[in-house]
Amino acid sequence: MLRTDENGASKPSPLRNISQSENQIIKTMTKPHILIIDDIIDNLMALGGVLEHEYDIQFASSGREGLELARQYPPDLILLDVMMPEMDGYAVFSELSGDPTTKGIPVIFVTAFNDTSNETRALTAGAVDFIHKPINPLVVLSRVKTQLMLKRRELELQRLNEALENRVRQRTAELEERTLQVEALNIALEQRARQAETANLAKRQFLGKMSHELRTPLNGIIGHTEILQRKVTDTTHLQKLAGIGKSANNLASVIIDILNFTDIDAGKLNLATVDFDLNDVIQHISDMIAPRACAKKLAYSVEIDPAIPPVLSGDPGKLGQVLINFVGNAVKFTHQGKVNVRACMAATGEQGDVTIRFEVQDTGIGIDPSKLNTIFEPFEQSDNTLTRPFGGIGLGLSINKKLVEMMGGETGVESEIGHGSTFWATFKLKRGKGQQPARPSELPPLEALRAHHASAKLLLVEDDSILQEILMELLEEAGLNVDMACNGEEAVAMAARQAYELILMDVQMPVMNGLDATRAIRKIPGRESTPIIAVSANAYDEDKVLCLDAGMNAFLAKPVQPEILFRELLYWLGKPK
């Protein structure tokens, strides 16, 4: 009996049913297995003829037969006719998609319907492709190969995913075990960290107390030495006093280096941000170092680039500390010739940033080239032998390097044995927003105090009798009128009765400490802006912060150099009230 297809052509009778034994043979073959479902034998033969050389082919002449075969022996790919009696291709595809056994099999629709709506319907339903009749053998082969390749890759990906999932499960179990081990280790590390923190705190407290107990008598030694040097005229005695002063200052430098290194090592060193005049910083360094150079008959000179802004913003204390170390070393290691200090503008930024390069050049002994790579390491020196002619503990340059890096710069050295060295450092600073402070006088600080602030009323708060004597003599030498308080409680009472132009405040005192005294004085009407300068043997950065937070205006670390004291007094007494 003949039927017509969708084009009106006659359809021959369907193929005979394929036995189960034949299908089993098909499934055991190694080639990809393709099921072709079409109710017209010519179409089956045409498609089979195109594919039989590369694939194992199984035929079904109706939708029901195709479903049964697909469920019994799931193929790798199905070529499905659309227009069939009893059950068309869309109905077959719907059942294939709903059956867990067959829903993953890729299906290519094959039909004489050559319109967009049918193609869209097939692809929307989930078919992987759509082939038009009459078939083009090359198109059929190409699309079948493409879909089988995609299916193989999908299966490979599934296998990889399964393997990966198994690996993940295995690794998860291992990680859970490791996590337990890490948690136990973290607990142990936290305990050790707490122990280390406690030990570091104890070390810092010990060093702080050691600093206080060493600085206080050192202040007495240095202070009395400098007072005697101002009064003694005998050359032999002056030489001995100079030796005492030098030894005391060396010890003070060692203490400062140890505290700075401890601060840096513990990450406790903080940078200030204030406006300052670079000329003042360099002048301060020259006031300290130039006399040493003069004593060794060395030429000492300073060059400052006029392009450098008159007011900068940064930490002048840390900058000065770096330069003092460089310049001090230059004088120390130079026996004849000169020491030259240079500051020049290296770069400018768009946000008001400026980079300034400092160089300290000397004609000293120079450094062995083999030491240049380690000279900035802690406790390293150019000569570590037992016969070395120069002292020191080898921390200064290491501290310099850390300070410069904290301020966004770099440091280095160029040197030649017997011809001298040039130590350099760059600092990233900002242009200051304030005005360059007026200089009322070019006189030295002591003479300027006598000239401009004679008889100014000051309060000195100090519990140590030796330091009382030294500071009183220095202040009276400057022509100042000084009252004395032995503790913070006395200071508060005296400040309430008398309006002082400036107060020098020790920090660690009996009865009431300097911090509490400052807070109490700031509450007295009219004393809110009285300059209060801390004078303390506690010299950690956090000690300075505590003083400023309590309401003090400035901080001087013991032992106090007279020139530094006079300069600070001159600055604060000269500020507008």
Image: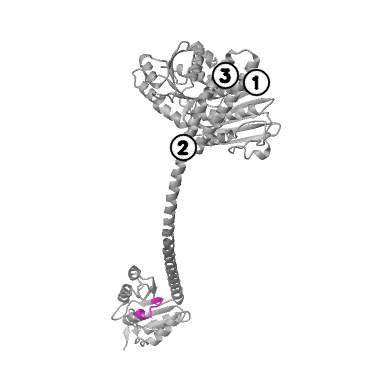
Q: CA distance from mark 3 to mark 1?
A: 18 Å
Which corner quadrant of the image does residue 420 belong to?
A: top right
Provide the secondary structure element on which disc 3 rests: helix
Where is residue 286? Give x, y as percent.
Answer: 58, 22
Question: What is the distance, in whole Å, between disc 2 and disc 1 at their CAs?
Answer: 42 Å
State the quadrant of the N terminus: bottom left
CB atoms of marks 2 and 1 within 8 Å? no
Residue 464 belongs to magenta span: no
Q: What's under tag 2, amino acid-wise?
A: Ala
Q: Earlier in the sequence, mark 2 or mark 3?
A: 2
Q: Which residues are magenta?
A: 70-78
Q: Earlier in the sequence, mark 3 or mark 1?
A: 3
Q: Which residue is mark 1?
A: 295
Q: Which mark is residue 225?
A: 3
Q: From the image, state whether disc 3 or disc 1 is nearer to you.
A: 3
Check disc 2 and report the residue beneath it. 202
Count residues near mark 1 (Cα–Cα under 10 Å), then give few for <14, some for 14-19, many for 20+.
Answer: few
Instruction: Residue at 58%, 13% (x, y): give it.
Output: 231
Residue 23 image position (x, y, % from top left): 40, 84
- Was residue 74 drawn as part of the magenta stretch in this picture? yes
Are dots 3 and 1 in contact, CB under 8 Å?
no
Q: Nearer the viewer, mark 2 or mark 1?
A: 2
Q: Is residue 304 visible?
A: no
Nearer-N-terminus badge (2/1):
2
Q: Residue furthest right?
A: 418
Image quadrant of residue 298? top right
Task: Give the Cα separation between the discs numbered 2 and 3.
Answer: 34 Å
Is residue 89 shown left or right of residue 486?
A: left
Look at the picture and state if 281 lies above or below 195: above
Residue 432 coordinates in the image, percent (x, y): 48, 27
